[in-house]
Amino acid sequence: MPTDDLTPQEAARQAARAGVPLPTERHAAVAAAAEHIRATVAVLRELDLADTPPAAAYRAVHDHGTEVA
């Protein structure tokens, strides 16, 4: 997992570069959300999913046993 946290200033710069200017009061919140997403993705990348069947192998079922369309 990266140790260099995204600063509010860097979050604002990247958002502006993507065409999404952020108000100053949102910089810290956006940086925190981006760091949370980055940490979550890092954990997911570590999972070994080699024996996991594709999603098409599953079907959704309600608690009462009927299949979800």
Image (cartoon, helix red, strand yellow):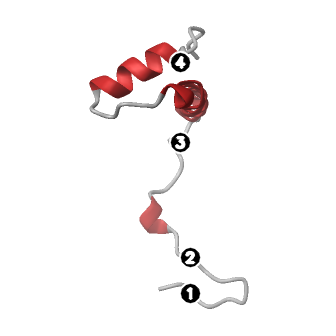
Q: Residue at x 28, y 23 (%)?
A: 17
Q: Residue at x 37, y 27 (%)?
A: 15
Q: Residue at x 33, y 34 (%)?
A: 20
Give the mark nearest the N terminus, 3 or 1: 3
x and y percentages locating residue 68 in the rendered image: 53, 84
Mark 3: which amino acid? Leu
Give the mark nearest the N terminus, 2 or 1: 2
The N terminus - image quarter: top right
Disc 3 to disc 1, how far (Cα)? 26 Å
Pointers 2 and 1 in contact (C-beta within 8 Å): yes
**Which label number is shown at residue 60?**
2
Q: Residues within 10 Å of mark 2 (few under 14, many from 20)?
A: few
Q: Which residue is mark 3?
A: 49
Q: Residues within 10 Å of mark 4 (few under 14, many from 20)?
A: some
Disc 4 to disc 3, how far (Cα)? 34 Å
Q: Which residue is mark 4?
A: 8
- Under tag 1, what secondary structure? loop
Pointers 4 and 2 in contact (C-beta within 8 Å): no
Give the mark nearest the N terminus, 4 or 2: 4
- Under tag 3, what secondary structure? loop
Mark 2: which amino acid? Ala
